[in-house]
Image: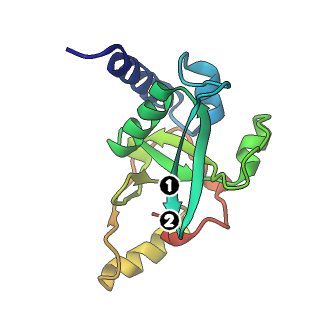
Amino acid sequence: MKTNLEKEITRIANAIVGLVERTDGPVTLARVQQEIAGFAKHAPPAWGYGITHSGRVISFWDDMTEAGAAALRKVIRERRVAIQFVSVLRYLLDGYVIKDEDWQPIVLLPARAANVDSQNWYLRVPQKMYEHFARQAAEGKTNLRLLTPHYVGATADGFFDVNTREDAA
């Protein structure tokens, strides 16, 4: 039998995927925070989600409930959505103020928009980076799997963060 926490994680995860699918394009985590009840928490204790890269913790999002953080991790790790790294401009246009200097802004896309399958998640990368990964794959220098993306209403290709490291996949 599922615990209350597990039920809440499932509910929030399904709501995240539903929002991303309904939108059919990039969804910021600020929008997820605004639209999905139980995702955000602005008082301690609060949870975050990020990765360690090159010895540094890079944050994708903070100020979540325990269930919200677990749900976000779940939909990304289970490849129910794709992530796309973006510049902070995408969030600034939505009125979000950046608080964390180690924040890496991402947006969520329907899983079918992914063009790269990494060991951790589905990614949507710009064409130039995709071509770079294709050359690496042809030379046997990467464990990334290239995908053929399917149509979605929009991507955040115009908001790609040029400072994002290519090896972050």
From the top left corner, tell me how far across and down residue 67 is, in percent.
45, 25
| Residue visible at 32% across and 86% down in the picture | 139
From the top left corner, tell me how far across and down residue 79 is, in percent.
35, 44
**148 or 34, nearer to the observer:** 34
| Residue visible at 50% across and 25% down in the picture | 19
Going by the numbered disc 2, the residue's amino acid type is Ala
Question: Where on the picture, by quarter, is residue 4?
Answer: top left
Model colouring: rainbow
**46 or 121, nearer to the observer:** 46
> Which is nearer the N-term, disc 1 or disc 2?
1
Q: Dot 2 surroundings within 10 Å: few (below 14), some, or many (20 or more)?
A: few
Taking 146 as reference, is 38 above or below it? Answer: above
Left-right relation of 86 to 48: right
Question: Where on the picture, by quarter, is residue 91?
Answer: top right
From the top left corner, tell me how far across and down residue 136 is, in percent.
39, 80
**61 or 111, nearer to the observer:** 61
| Residue visible at 66% across and 51% down in the picture | 103
Going by the numbered disc 1, the residue's amino acid type is Ile
- Location of the N terminus by quadrant is top left
**Secondary structure under the numbered disc 1 in the rendered image:** strand
Looking at the image, the residue that sits furthest to the bottom is 139
Residue under label 1: 51
Taking 6 as reference, is 94 above or below it? Answer: below
Residue under label 2: 168
Q: Dot 1 surroundings within 10 Å: few (below 14), some, or many (20 or more)?
A: few
